[in-house]
Every structure is written in C-alpha cells, then in structure tokens.
Image (cartoon, helix red, strand yellow):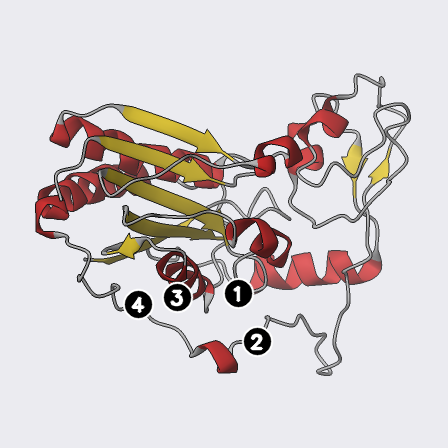
Amino acid sequence: MQAKRVWAMYWSATDTTKRVVTAVAQQAAQALAVPLKEYDFTLPQARQGAPDFTADDLVVFGTPTYAGRVPNVLLKYLATVEGHGAAAVPVVTFGNRAFDDSLIELRDILSDNGFVPFAAAAFVGEHSFSTTLAAGRPDADDLDKAAQFGREIAARAAEITADTQPITVPGRGRDERTYYQPRDRAGNSIDIRKVKPKTSEACDDCGLCAKLCPMGSINPENVREFTGICIKCGACVKKCPKGAKYYDDPGYLYHKSELEEGYRRRAAVSLFL
C-alpha cells in the first residue's frame, strides 16, 4: 500500500493510551510525509460514528486492557468500525500486570472488520486504580520506543497488501479467552463490578467529572449521583482538580493494594513486526 493518511484512533479515559497511540502515529506520518488524523472515541458522543477508512489509510488503533481483555463496553461500538482494507496497527496499554488476551482480541476485531493488522504493540500505562502502579508511564523511554515503532511501521507500510496475514501476537484462541478475576489470599473472588466512587466535601460542583465520564454515567446536575455503570476507568478520580472522587469499597481497595504490592517491577513494552 501507499499510505496517504495516518490515523491515531483510540479510547483513553486517563490519556495513557492516547499518549502512546499518538506518539506512534505521529512518527509514522512524519516518516511517510502524509497527513496525521486523530479520532478519539472515549466519550459516548464520539461512539456514534467513525472515520470512513480506505485502503490508503494506515490506522494506529488503541485501547486499554481491562481484566486482560479489550474493555467489553467497547465491543458493540468496535464491531461497527469498518476498515475497507486499511492497514492497521493494534496497540493496547496495560497497568503493569499483563496484557493477557487484549492484544490478540483487538487484532481479531480489526481483522474481522476489514482492516489488515500487520504490526502490533503492548505498552505500559499508569494503572487506572493507582498513582503508584506504573506511575508516570508511558514515560520518556516508553515514548522513545513508541516513536521508533512508528518509524518501523512506516518503513513496512509499502509491503502491505490485502493478502497480508494478520500479525502473530501472544494470546489464547477466541473460545478460550476469559477475564482476569481478582481474588483474595484465600482464593475467593473479589467482585468490584458494581462499585462506584464516592464524592468528598472537597467537590465544588464544577461538573468536570460528568463531562469526562466515558460512559456518561455521572449526573451533570448532581455529580454525586450515578445514572449508569462505572467501569473503574479512573477518569473522574485522576482528573478531578479538587481530588474529590475516591473509592472506599473494601474489595476494591484490597485488589488495588494487591496489585501495587505484587507488580512493582517495571513491566516491559512488547512490539510485534
């Protein structure tokens, strides 16, 4: 293919996936001397449509890893995004534990939708639950790797055809994939699916959390009220200028602590070309 545009397309509640995907896409566009386009589908209104991709596009497509998979709340939308032969680079971020089956799942989604996924990557981002687990990542070293990866995919783009086979990445087959299940030390499951953040007296009702919620679940008229599900993405907690959003659920806090204690090592970036 002869790419005429490079796209950075991503879902990124706390901007970690955005930073990685845009770093890769910017370098690819620069190396190919073509325009860079961006499509952020984090907020609900952006998931009402998608770009009209063609076989002249190279799309760097990113999502975070939730419980070892592509966030299940995105699956319905992702099924509507059609590639029409566009070259694609699936990219996932993960919070220092593991990316499990998220990358292979995103690769399969893109392939099923008419994209040609010819390269892939898994980068580390600060965990949505924590400010210490993979704190500050992607950092300068990660973004250097992202930039180099962008240049490498640009160099390969001319080789890509409609018959190019999907890039091989680690992960289980479609029928074998499960979601990561947090457990306590006795092996009992910890279910945090219905847990929602609380709001402290520091809140000044600015309404930013309602505007930032990727699920549109915070009532803008009363930001202490949830009108939908909470996916624990961290947007309202980490981006509140007053630090007013917090979790106090014991299971959530136990799981957060276990992750912080158990995954202190610096997890590696994985690149597939």
Determine whether 266 is above or below 221 in the image.
Answer: below
Q: Residue at x 17, y 26 (%)?
A: 30
Q: CA distance from mark 3 to mark 4?
A: 6 Å
Please state which amino acid type lies under the numbered disc 4: Val
Question: Residue 176: where, in percent of width, then height?
Answer: 50, 82
- The residue wearing badge 1 is 68
Task: Decide which of tag 3 and tag 2 comes sooner along the chain.
Answer: 3
> Where does the image place residue 248, in percent across and percent down from the top left?
83, 49
Query: Which residue matches tag 3?
Result: 104
**Distance from label 1 to label 2 (Cα)?**
8 Å
Q: What residue sits 37% from the left and 39% below the top?
A: 20
Quarter of the rendering containing residue 55: top left
Query: Mark 1 and mark 3: span between their CA atoms?
Result: 11 Å
Residue 38 in view, yes or no:
yes
Q: Amino acid at mark 1?
A: Gly
Q: Nearer the viewer, residue 120 or 259?
A: 120
Q: Against 90, is 170 above or below?
A: below
Judge whether 74 appears above or below 4 on screen.
Answer: below
